[in-house]
């Protein structure tokens, strides 16, 4: 299933994702998950990723992918389910950042 289809499926379940996640472009940055009801917004989770689209929608454990597949075994899908069942809409915001690391280097302390 393509990301655009996952985004539409999420929307039908009251999860609003940024449209830029529909592209195949890799987005590095911070993502924030909010529960919104009666004009009150509650932050549920803040995360970071070098591939936000995969972190949210990827079949290897993406937060939203897991929720859409009724897998609530991890914290974020569990929290999303809890708030949706209380009538909240889930809104996800992303904040892209520049990231140009080519490799990780072991660091010795002491």
Image (tube, rainbow, N blue to C red):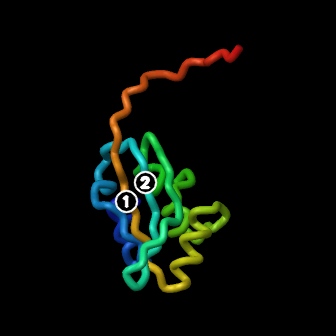
Mark 1 surroundings: few (<14), some (14-19) or many (≥20) residues within 10 A: some
Establish if 6 lies above or below 59.
below
**What residue is at 41 percent from the left and 60 percent from the top?**
1
Quadrant of the rendering where the C terminus is positioned: top right
Tell me how far mark 1 sits from mark 2, CA to CA. Answer: 6 Å
Q: Are marks 1 and 2 in contact (CB under 8 Å)?
A: yes
User: Residue 42: where, in percent of width, then height?
Assistant: 48, 71
Q: Secondary structure at mark 1?
A: strand
Establish if 101 lies above or below 23.
above
Mark 2 surroundings: few (<14), some (14-19) or many (≥20) residues within 10 A: some
Establish if 80 lies above or below 106.
below
Q: Secondary structure at mark 2?
A: strand
User: Residue 33: where, in percent of width, then height?
Assistant: 46, 63
In depth, the one of 11 and 84 nearer the eye is 84
Which disc is residue 31 wearing? 2
Q: 42 left or right of 5?
A: right
User: Residue 50: where, in percent of width, then height?
Assistant: 44, 40
**What residue is at 42 percent from the left and 72 percent from the top?**
15
Establish if 81 lies above or below 101.
below
Q: Which residue is mark 1?
A: 93
**What residue is at 53 percent from the left and 22 percent from the top?**
104
Q: 20 left or right of 50?
A: left
């Amino acid at each position: 299933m393509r990301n655009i289809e996952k985004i539409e499926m999420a929307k039908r379940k009251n999860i609003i994702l940024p449209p830029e996640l529909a592209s195949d472009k890799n987005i590095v940055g911070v993502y924030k998950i909010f529960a919104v009801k009666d004009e009150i917004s509650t932050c549920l989770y803040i995360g970071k990723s070098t591939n936000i689209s995969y972190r949210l929608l990827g079949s290897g454990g993406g937060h939203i992918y897991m929720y859409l597949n009724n897998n609530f075994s991890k914290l974020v899908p569990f929290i999303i389910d809890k708030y949706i069942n209380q009538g909240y809409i889930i809104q996800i915001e992303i904040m892209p950042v520049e990231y140009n690391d080519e490799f990780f280097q072991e660091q010795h302390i002491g």
